[in-house]
Image (spheres, rainbow, N blue to C red):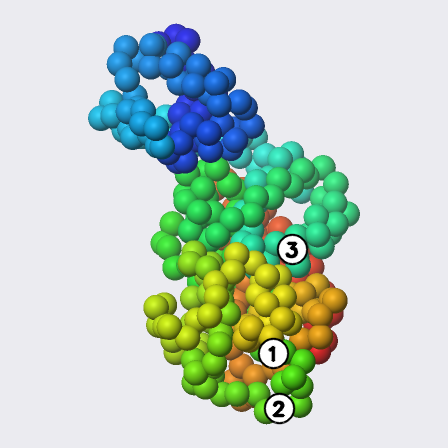
Amino acid sequence: MIGLTLKHFRYFDALAQKGHFGRAAEACSISQPALSVQIKELEAMMGAPLVERTARQIRLTTLGEEFLIRARQVLADVEAMGELARTGEGPLRGTLRMGIIPTVAPYLLPAIIRGLSDALPELELRPRESVTQSLLEDLRQSRLDFVVAALPVSEPALEEFALFDEEFILVRGAQDAGLPTPRPDRLQEMKLLLLEEGHCFRDQALSFCDMKRSDPSLLMEGSSLSTLVQMVDAGLGLTLIPEMAVPLERKGTSVTLTRFEGKPPKRTIGMIWRKTNPLAEQLSGLGDILQRIGQEQRDRYVL
């Protein structure tokens, strides 16, 4: 057991998450044969198989499941010690792992990186883009320090810090320029294009339109807002995008963008971190900086 290293724990954790040697190797930035060797070495030290191997996926054995629980606790403890090392007096420094959702990352992340480079020059930000549930799981497991996503997430163990609100904008084809903005309940009668399952922005849009997930009027699901806007520009329907996406996604298109009248749909973008994180106080200070950056970006959204 003396030969066990953090590398073994991290590789096994990745394999358990991905359920596949190839995807786990990619996540760990190593080759698949190298990962396989490390797992076999780990099993040899444990004296029994930790995974069942099939052609398409792996399953954890009973021992593997027990080992995973303990391995993740070890990794969490190591990360907590790293966080403690950064809780001294003064501004944040060192590496900070940030998660950010796809409907925010392309539009806000460049400004965050520039702003933090000026405000906290000793801080190295490591962003990772994924959907909300994946990021929250990484946050719970101490693989991320904080997440930027839509609020609320309403989990007792997590702290939420609101950064800014933004409206949803209706995107229609050029032929609809000058037409009245349809009421939300009319959108379900039209060819509404939405993000695929897993994106919180999809659920927010469906809620605003009072539509069910399985509504047959959904013509297409896309993996990005950019794809949806391009499809609208091709005349295949209409969609909703957040305000911050307007400057980038309208470029090179002839789409018509309009705000909703009355009480427009909107979302709150904020930071989320574990309440037990020793960096909690400093993350709150970081939130003040991101709040300012977000508001400055939001001031650029002019239709």
The picture places residue 22, in percent across and down from the top left corner, at 46, 29
Amino acid residing under circle 1: Arg
The picture places residue 260, in percent across and down from the top left corner, at 57, 84
Pointer 3 residue = 106
Question: Foreground residue, 144 or 237?
Answer: 237
29 left or right, relative to 76: right
The residue carrying pointer 3 sits among few (fewer than 14), some (14 to 19) or many (20 or more) residues within 10 Å by Cα, namely: some
127 left or right, relative to 222: right
Is label 3 in a helix, a strand or a loop?
Answer: helix
* Viewer-side label of 3, 1: 1
138 left or right, relative to 107: left
Q: Are marks 2 and 1 in contact (CB under 8 Å)?
A: yes
Pointer 2 residue = 179
Is label 2 in a helix, a strand or a loop?
Answer: loop
Check the image and name the residue furthest to the left.
62
Q: Quadrant of the C terminus?
A: bottom right
Residue 80 lies, with reference to residue 218, above or below; the image says above
Residue 197 lies, with reference to residue 122, above or below; the image says below
Amino acid residing under circle 3: Pro
Q: Residue at x 62, y 90 (%)?
A: 179
The residue carrying pointer 2 sits among few (fewer than 14), some (14 to 19) or many (20 or more) residues within 10 Å by Cα, namely: few
First of labels 3, 1 by sequence position: 3
